[in-house]
């Protein structure tokens, strides 16, 4: 079964991919969000030439070939583009077999426990505490994640004293029974990360994400070794060799591949398998309500080392509301795997596709 055409429907925020085969089968996927119009160009220029005419069901070989032929262009945009084709092919396979993707992976669809993920650093500690308490009462979340420090902040807080005020305020608001995670977004040097980590431990935090610049593996390992609080990371990483090094050196205690950043479900499954062999849990990054969260639902339903919660953004996401149905919602602290059909279980909006920028690469 050979790939006949690859189509993209792109905005600056998100790019939907449709793959069709010579026999008439089709599947839908998505690249990583953000500057997705650029990713669409990369897809047609640097991925499509190596995917057209390929066996649509041999995803491992296709993934390897696309990476190998782009060895001069590591890694980000190539992997973002590859993710669009790879996830479309998983959808295609599910439709051919009449199964959801998680069923293809040997699991059954079921609701996944989620943590409410805050994306804001512009919010005052007392306001963050209040809104998380409100969500605790209305959604049933049993865990939340908040942002500490500042993004790539060189030890600087978003404003002086915010982190030290935020963490205890949120802990008091959500109570001791609710799990609390924090994300440093590459803010700290090891010395400061360990200082912050001690404060987090005193407040019952059980997940300290990306405390140091993510590329400084030795720094992150130093923090992980010093703290009892588990250190998480890896959302930005898309080089499988880097993943093997990260896991072998125990730089993190929890691995967080992003299906759309790492190059698709096929490569995310490889990361999860490396982590499982090392005895580490996998909690993929899924920081918006695009198809990335749908992909994450399916992989968490199937892998043996899935973390106890899935990341689920609590922020408004108007740019995803009209993208596909059913709209993702948290109920009783869980998010259901979409089930409108086989594959990813979603239906893309024809009106959204018609408004997006369209490109096609076809077999000669």
Image (cartoon, rainbow, N blue to C red):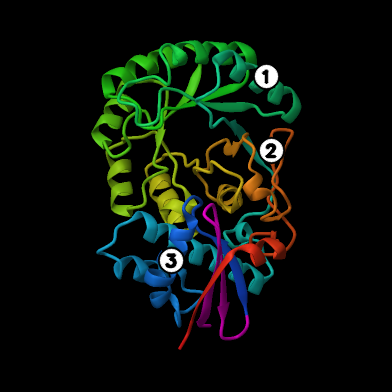
Decide which of tag 2 and tag 1 comes sooner along the chain.
1
Residue 256, image quadrant: top left
Q: How many marks?
A: 3
Give percent across and percent down for residue 350. Answer: 71, 65
Residue 5 lies within the magenta run: yes
Q: Residue furthest bottom?
A: 364
Give percent across and percent down for residue 109. Answer: 68, 52
Do callouts 3 and 1 mark residues in contact (Cβ within 8 Å)?
A: no
**Residue in the foreground of this view, choosing between 125 and 197:** 125
Q: Residues within 10 Å of mark 2 (few under 14, many from 20)?
A: many
Left or right side of 292 for 325? right
Residue 158 marker = none
Q: Which residue is mark 1?
A: 133
Residue 45, image quadrant: bottom left
Residue 41 marker = 3
Above-or-below relation of 302 to 48 = above
Name the residue rendered at 62%, 55% in the picture. Answer: 107
- Which label lies toward us, 3 or 2? 3
Magenta stretch: dominant SS? strand
Q: Secondary structure at mark 2?
A: strand
Q: Is residue 19 visible?
A: yes
Give percent across and percent down for residue 268. Answer: 45, 53
Q: Residues within 10 Å of mark 1 (few under 14, many from 20)?
A: some
Q: Which residue is mark 2?
A: 334
CA separation, marks 3 and 2?
A: 36 Å
Decide which of tag 3 and tag 1 comes sooner along the chain.
3
Decide which of tag 3 and tag 2 comes sooner along the chain.
3
Rendered-image quadrant of the C terminus: bottom left
Above-or-below relation of 327 to 116 = below
Q: Secondary structure at mark 1?
A: helix
Above-or-below relation of 142 to 344 = above
Q: Which stretch appears magenta?
A: 1-24
């Amino acid at each position: 079964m050979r790939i006949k055409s690859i189509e993209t429907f792109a905005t600056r925020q998100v790019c939907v991919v449709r793959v069709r085969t010579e026999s008439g089968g089709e599947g839908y996927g998505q690249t990583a969000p953000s500057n997705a119009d650029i990713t669409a160009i990369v897809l047609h220029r640097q991925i499509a030439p190596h995917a057209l005419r390929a066996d649509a069901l041999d995803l491992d070989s296709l993934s390897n070939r696309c990476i190998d032929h782009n060895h001069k262009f590591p890694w980000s945009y190539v992997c973002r583009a590859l993710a669009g084709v790879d996830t479309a092919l998983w959808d295609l396979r599910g439709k051919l077999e009449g199964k959801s993707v998680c069923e293809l992976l040997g699991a059954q669809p079921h609701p996944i426990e989620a943590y409410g993920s805050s994306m804001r650093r512009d919010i005052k500690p007392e306001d963050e505490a209040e809104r998380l308490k409100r969500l605790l009462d209305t959604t049933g979340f049993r865990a939340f994640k908040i942002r500490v420090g500042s993004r790539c902040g060189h030890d600087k807080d978003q404003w002086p004293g915010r982190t030290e005020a935020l963490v205890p305020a949120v802990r008091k608001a959500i109570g001791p029974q609710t799990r609390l995670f924090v994300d440093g977004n590459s803010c700290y040097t090891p010395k400061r990360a360990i200082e912050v980590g001690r404060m987090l431990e005193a407040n019952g935090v059980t997940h300290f994400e990306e405390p140091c610049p993510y590329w400084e593996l030795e720094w992150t390992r130093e923090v992980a070794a010093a703290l009892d609080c588990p250190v998480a990371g890896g959302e930005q990483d898309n080089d499988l060799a880097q993943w093997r090094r990260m896991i072998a050196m125990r730089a993190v205690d929890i691995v967080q591949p992003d299906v759309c950043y790492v190059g698709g479900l096929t490569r995310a499954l490889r990361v999860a398998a490396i982590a499982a062999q090392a005895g580490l849990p996998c909690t993929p990054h899924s920081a918006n309500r695009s198809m990335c969260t749908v992909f994450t639902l399916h992989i968490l339903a199937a892998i043996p080392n899935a973390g106890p919660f899935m990341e689920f953004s609590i922020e408004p996401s108007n740019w995803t509301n009209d993208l596909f149905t059913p709209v993702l919602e948290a109920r009783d602290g869980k998010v259901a795997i979409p089930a409108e059909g086989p594959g990813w279980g979603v239906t893309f909006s024809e009106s959204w596709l018609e408004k997006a920028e369209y490109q096609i690469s076809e077999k000669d």
